[in-house]
Amino acid sequence: MLIVEILRLAFSSLTSNKLRSGLTILGIAVGVFSVIGVMTLINGMRSSIESGLNVLGANSFQVSKWPPINFSDPRERFRNRRDITYPVASHFKELIGDSARINFVIGRGGQTVIYRDRRTNPNVLLLGTDENYITAFNYDVAAGRNLGPDDVEYGRPVCVLGADVVQRIFPDEEALGRLIRINGQNYTVVGLLAVKGTMFGGSQDNRVITPITRFLAIYGRAFRSISINVQAPSQAELAATQEKAVGMMRLARGLHPEDFNDFEVFSNESLIEAFNKIADVVAAGALIISAIALLASGVGVMNIMLVSVTERTKEIGIRKSIGAKKRSILTQFLAEAVALSLIGGVAGVAIGVGGGNAVAMMMSMTITFPWMWAGIGMLVCGGIGIVFGLYPAWKAASLDPIEALRYE
Amino acid sequence: MTRTVYELSEAIRIAFAQIYANKLRSALTALGVIIGIVAVTLMGTAILGIDAGVERSLAGFGDDVLYVTKWPWHDISDWWNYRNRPEISTDYAQPVNDWIAEHPEGPLKLAVPAAAWNATIVRGEYKVSNIFTLGTSADLSRVVRSDMKEGRFFSEIEGRSARNVVVIGFDVADALFPNESPLGKMIRIRDQQYSVVGVAARQGSFLGLFSWDSMIIMPLDAFARSFPLRWADPEIRVQVDLARMDEAKDELRGIMRRVRKLGPEKRDDFEINSQQVIREQIDPIKQKIALAGLFITGLALFVGAIGIMNITYVSVKERTKEIGTRKALGARRRTILLQFLIEAVSICVLGGIGGLTMAWGMASVVGAIMPSFPLVFSTGLVLIGLFASVATGVFSGFAPAWQASKLDPVVALRYE
């Protein structure tokens, strides 16, 4: 009953001074817009980068000599590590046994694929790998078949082409069964990969995969290190598999108990985590800068509430003299301030989400609705109403009724 | 004329009397402006600072130097078209210098060969790695605008006779020779000993951009003894007449085509770069940061302006009777308008001065804590800040002042 009365009073005084309330709400709305807009934009950037980082297949992680993202450590720290060779990798595969699916990858960039008089630019990635490559890196076979275990076992000269390569040298022609040439070696095309798309502007379809045994037979190891992808049977067993893989890798590498791991283990999650460390700092900086406007609008609320208290001194005096308690005057003015801020908050969230997404769309990034920031925005608005409304409300509540009645 | 002056001084007097009478309200209004001005000014210092840092780094390249290289400095997607270009030979400096000797009035001034490698430098138990090591001729000291902290650049004779002498950057000197002068001391790179003849003056680094501080320079032939010249990105640096940049580029291109013996139908198999190329890549990023930063902080100032407008409306409403009285006594519309406008503007200017002072204080504190971040607090910025606060006052005070000036004295006097 009392609450309803307080709210009614608050809204009636807000509507009686439409211009004044409108300007104050506008101030809050601009402040919230600044925070929400910036945060929406940053969220959009984050989610588009995160989806780009989803290179690996489900429940899988990668063991390799080099770290995937490295901002701080010098190259020297990793350069002197031993390469992961085929015998070491095979030993590792034996040790893991049936508990996880293992995939080896070794590659050479800058290759030209030739078919009759057609040739690609010398920028195709040739990968030596096995039948599990497709599941390990989230590819699909569009036509033909995947590499098979027997292709790997016998080192057959066969290959599966990425979508970009197919488009380039078999634009309107059946590719399956044709003989292509890379670096003077012939390969029979047995399958085609479906389009995967780009990551950070680089195509992931400009590649050719062939059995790793064939690759090693042609090029040798040539100072290259094999990357091993391990796919756990399920999400639940991922952690256990990862632990086991680290132990088996140490065994395969012949490390002593006191040695550090001389290889990197990473998954999609750890990639995203590494990226998020940087994104968090950026987001915090942006939050502080964009919250300045919100602070300024809080000061505006306080000012207007003080004016409102001064103007209604007589009203307060009358209410007090006929028995209104200090607390009810305080709540009345606080409710008014909070109502002002919340209305501004709703408007600000709406404009901010719209504006942030508009910019994100212009930069062709994922559109998101930052539920968390919208919620926080509303909470903060309520907080601003309380913090900046408290002093004026307290001032009103502690007016002496006799003085207040006499006020002119 | 005298009347205008009188009106103006009267308006200012009333404005300050009003501000004084409503101390808390004026202070809070000014606080809104202060927050806005502090935000905008600090963002301005940061942007100017980034500018200064980039400039400082680019100064190392010299704005009057053209670089003849195999690879262009800008991003290319068709790199395989460049891959098979022949390497630039350091001998090409000679024909360019010959041309310069024949054409003393030409746009080119001096050609210097250079090659670079990242090396590890050892001195006793001290060791620094990944140091940009430049092999060049003694003429480089005439091309770059860098002072020596102590010692000298290596001489023509030392350059020609491939003596093992080096000039080291400030940070390298600091790391290898703490608390002593490096002059005359020996350092080791790979299997060669070099004696230090000079230390370059400190340039300062910014965001990991290129800086002279972490590099060393030695004669080209001494460099070739330790490092494979062919793989060391050999290049020719040509100092040109800054006013005749385009002419210089054409002339240099002609010389290089003659040196390479390219037929008229052949494309260039070398690239002529200038600092401009780097600038073109950095500028759009810089502008985007500046735009976004100023927009977001500008919002804070906008909120402050809304606060002023609001309070001026309140002020007009409270003093309706006073306005009525003044109008009845013959005050003109302009006088009333001016009075309220000046009130709004003075609060803004007071806030602006307060904000600039605070921003200056904060910038000094940040500068003291993080000397590597070059905050620049310029007079231009102060002027812009003051101008912004006056503009804010006019922008936000005009609508309420206009309303006040339009009041009908009869209605206003009756207002309760």
Image: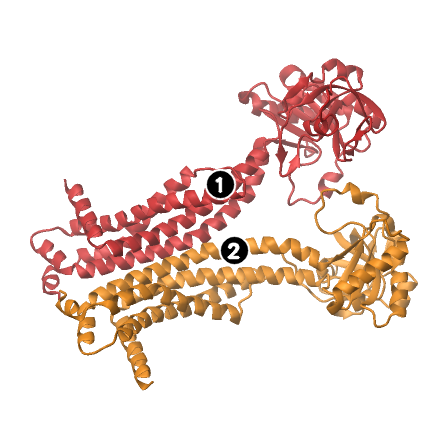
Chain colours: A red, B orange
Residue A249 visible from this viewpoint: yes
Residue at (69, 21) in percent of width and height: A192
Q: Position of residue B219 (x, y in %)?
A: 86, 60
Q: Position of residue B395 (x, y in %)?
A: 37, 64
User: Which of the chains bears the disc numbered 2?
Assistant: B
Residue that sits furthest to the left in the current view: A322
**Within 10 Å of the Cα at label 2, are there few (<14), some (14-19), or many (20+) other Cα atoms?**
few
Residue at (84, 63) in percent of width and height: B111
The quarter holding residue A292 reads bottom left
Residue hosting label 1? A43
Residue at (44, 62) in percent of width and height: B38
Q: Is residue B155 above or below residue A266?
A: below
Q: Is residue B144 above or below residue B283?
A: below
In-image side of A174 versus A345 (left or right): right
Which amino acid is tagged 1? Asn
Residue hosting label 2? B291
| Front residue of B236 and A106 | B236
In-image side of A206 versus A408 (left or right): right
| Front residue of B21 and B128 | B21
